[in-house]
Amino acid sequence: MKKVLPALLIGLISTLGLTLANAEGEVLNANTATAEELSAIPNMDEFLVEAVINNRPYATIGALDELLGADLSNEELEALYAHLFVPVNLNTADKSDILMIPGVGDRMAHEFEEYRPYSNIEQFRREMSKYVDEKEVARLAQYVTLD
């Protein structure tokens, strides 16, 4: 029975058109999300799903924003980026890309840049925890990479 319940839960989530990542509030990578995952995001119709997939890879969030900005309002884009993003490289990203992370303003973008270069994600977590709580650090970490 213990093995059956997780399988049933996964099946139910899939039936509802959700993914485990979305169900847990995780941010999907626009370069790797499946069509099914993209379709489960609010405001992502078939046309936008196809556009995202057909224009991969995105070097930056700015490239994705340029593509989607033609069809979505600023408010729709902001809501979308809570679910879908192109991870920002902590050591090389422009301030404009850092500012596209939902909830990041000039002050926090400055903090992102101030601690460069980052040697690992734990360093990022440690430095950002000086400014925001653990839950917010975890949320921000979904939007960044060291690739």
Image (cartoon, helix red, strand yellow):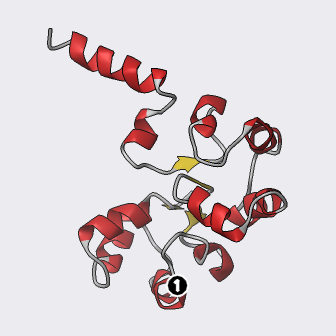
Residue 106 visible, this orientation? yes
Q: Which residue is mark 1?
A: 105
Q: Which residue is located at x 57 percent, y 61 percent?
A: 79
| Quadrant including the N terminus | top left
- Residue 57: x and y in percent read 75, 47
Which residue type does callout 1 highlight? Gly
Determine whether, in the image, residue 107 is placed left or right of residue 133.
right
Q: Which residue is located at x 72 percent, y 40 percent?
A: 45
Q: In the displayed structure, would residue 132 be above or below residue 42? A: below
| Quadrant including the C terminus | bottom right
Task: Check the image and name the residue furthest to the left.
Answer: 1
Determine whether, in the image, residue 96 is placed left or right of residue 135.
right
Q: Secondary structure at mark 1?
A: loop
Q: In the displayed structure, would residue 92 be above or below residue 12? A: below
- Residue 31: x and y in percent read 67, 45
Q: Which residue is located at x 66 percent, y 31 percent?
A: 35
Between 137 and 77, the residue placed more toward the observer is 77
Determine whether, in the image, residue 99 is placed left or right of residue 112.
right
Between 88 and 67, the residue placed more toward the observer is 67
Q: Which residue is located at x 64 percent, y 47 percent?
A: 30
Between 123 and 102, the residue placed more toward the observer is 102
Between 113 and 61, the residue placed more toward the observer is 61
Residue 120 visible, this orientation? no
